[in-house]
Image (cartoon, rainbow, N blue to C red):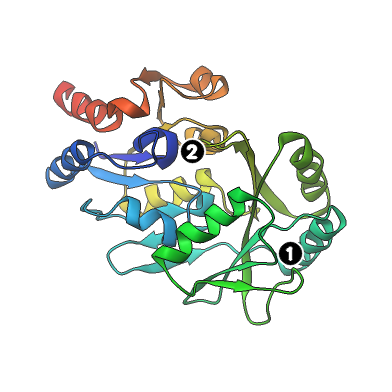
Amino acid sequence: MKTLYITDLDGTLLDNAGRLPSCVREELNALIAQGVLFSAATARSPVSAMPLLAGVDLRLPLILLNGVFLYDPAAGKVLSHSAIEPESARTAVRIYQQYDKNPFLFTFDGERVRYYYTELRTPEQEAFFRARSRIQPGCFYRLDALSVPKGQDAVYFTLMDRYEDLKPLKEELERRCAVRTAFYHDTYTQYWYLEVFSAGAGKKNGALALRALTGADHVCAFGDNLNDLGLFDAADMRVAVANAVPELRQKADFIIGSNQEGGVPRFIRDQLTRR
């Protein structure tokens, strides 16, 4: 029986500082060397996910941007992507403008991911911009007004703000656009994330695609936050870390130690021992 293990990153595999401890990295590499099918499903894009997983012997595609991309870490390329339908993308732009909100817009042209913004209004937006610009200088492009550049697919909008500001925006985007959303509390601040992407994406669909690609018989998923609910829906075994939100803990088959305790590789090791 082939089991595919898929873990969320922030708040699940990574510690509270957003880092992968060396001991966890070593345990994962030992498991992968034994033939364990291991991958990650995250809201992060290639530019922010890959440095965090440096040193891990990744042999399977990753599920990035909440299922928008299946990404080959060895080749550094997108294997498949789900674009927002053009009219829905244009409608979303108008809604953001109506609400006077300035999300980051991610696009894909078949080869390259680009990141667009109009202005950086908050320290959180500036931190988001600076962190990714350090990793990949020149990946961000400034727009005078939010729009989807010609010749590119809009694949993702992301915005961090207060819950009460984002909730009505989320509801209108879902009502008027053919999109999915991920709406959840940020792991590292007091703010919430609203992420908007294709109706054909989502961690669930990404996990199902990876399962088919690997020929796995079962999927074991690890998570901590609301955007992991879809990942749990695709799994045969659902594992929540101790610091997970109550909604996810209620759906879990197992609850393990917190993200500070390196519980993901330990649980995988225990499962292998019991076979």
First of labels 2, 1 by sequence position: 1
User: What mark, if any, has residue 123 been given in the picture?
Assistant: none
Q: Name the secondary structure under disc 1.
A: helix
Q: Residue at x 66, y 59 (%)?
A: 120
In this image, 164 relative to 234: left or right? Answer: right
Q: How many numbered circles are shown?
A: 2
Left/right of residue 256 with respect to residue 270 in the rendered view: right
Give the residue type that dot 2 points to. Answer: Leu
- Expressed as whole percent of the image width and height from the top left, the position of residue 230 reads 54, 38
Amino acid type assigned to the residue bearing label 1 in the image = Ala
Q: Residues within 10 Å of mark 2 (few under 14, many from 20)?
A: many
Q: Which residue is mark 1?
A: 89
Picture layout, residue 197 above or below residue 248: below
Task: Using the image, tell me which numbered label, if any, was put on residue 231.
Answer: 2
Q: Position of residue 257 (x, y in %)?
A: 33, 20
Alpha-carbon span between mark 2 and mark 1: 25 Å
In the rendered image of this protein, does residue 259 appear above or below residue 107? above
- Relative side of 110 to 181, left or right: left
Of residues 218 and 127, the one nearer the viewer is 127
